[in-house]
Image (cartoon, grey):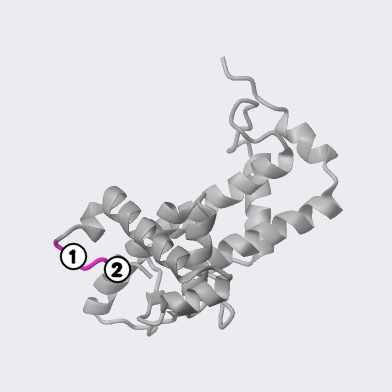
Amino acid sequence: MREEHDLRAALRDADWPTLLGRLANHAERRLRWAGWITDRKTAAHAMTPHELVNHAVDRCLQGKRRWYKDAGYPSLESFLCWVIRSLLSTEIKADARDRADFADDGIVEGRSDEPSPEDAVADGERTEVMAAIVACADGDSDLEDFYMAVLGGHVRREDIAEKLGWTVERASAARIKLQRRLLAHHPELFGTSKKVRTP
């Protein structure tokens, strides 16, 4: 039987002045990684880092998240960071009204408030593509950094390498690795019948 942490007690006794700042920094990194915050704009539908942290804590207080001792999250902070990642992933996948457009230059740009039926179909497909990229990069620091660089507008491998302090070969390896993961895990989106649409 799995042993559960006393999550309410841990939340009650936490050093919140310190923990909130650390969680907000983590949430901001995840929101940037997901493309909901970039250096140029914030997506209209996106939450702020503090809203994401509050959402995570609320879910825990409501008993909708359980913290098991054998789940690989030894501290309250590591557990709450996992909750933040999980909630953000769910929000991205569930946001059927997402209007983000992953443009050719890798910048997330808003679309018209009144899209045509063709735009709505294209937006739905782009949302699926974005969610797939986020899922395939999650947990791999090179892929996450690569994706963040692309979201920041760096598309050429030379530019990505310079931005990240990598060699060009490392940037190419990250691109190939991400493409292979997308093909393996999402063939319906990135299979041979479709153009591989990675950043």
Q: Amino acid at mark 2?
A: Arg
Q: In what element is the residue under mark 2?
A: loop
Q: Amino acid at mark 1?
A: Lys
Question: What residue do we see at 40% from left, 69% from top?
Answer: 98
Q: Is residue 13 above or below residue 94?
A: above
Q: Which residues are magenta?
A: 193-197
Q: Is residue 44 visible?
A: no
Of 103 and 155, nearer the camera is 155
Question: What residue do we see at 65% from left, 24% from top?
Answer: 4
Gap between marks 2 and 1, in whole Å? 8 Å
Question: What residue do we see at 44% from left, 81% from top?
Answer: 109
Q: Does the segment drawn in magenta span residue 176?
A: no
Tell me where residue 31 appears, x and y as whole percent: 57, 64
Q: Main secondary structure of the magenta part?
A: loop
Question: What residue do we see at 33% from left, 61% from top?
Answer: 128
Residue 120 in the figure: left or right of residue 25: left
Q: Is residue 177 above or below residue 118?
A: above
Tell me where residue 30 appears, x and y as whole percent: 58, 60
Residue 150 in the figure: left or right of residue 118: right
Graded by Cα atoms within 10 Å as few (under 14), some (14 to 19) or many (20 or more), the crowding at tag 2 reads: some
Tell me where residue 170 appears, x and y as whole percent: 46, 63
Tell me the quarter of the image containing the N terminus. Answer: top right
Decide: marks 2, 1 in contact (CB < 8 A)?
yes
Q: Residue furthest top?
A: 1
- Name the image quarter holding residue 82: top right
Check residue 194 in the rendering and tell me which mark sits there, or answer none.
1
Q: Which residue is mark 2?
A: 197
Graded by Cα atoms within 10 Å as few (under 14), some (14 to 19) or many (20 or more), the crowding at tag 1 reads: few
Q: Does the segment drawn in magenta span residue 196?
A: yes
Q: In what element is the residue under mark 1?
A: loop
- Name the image quarter holding residue 155: bottom left
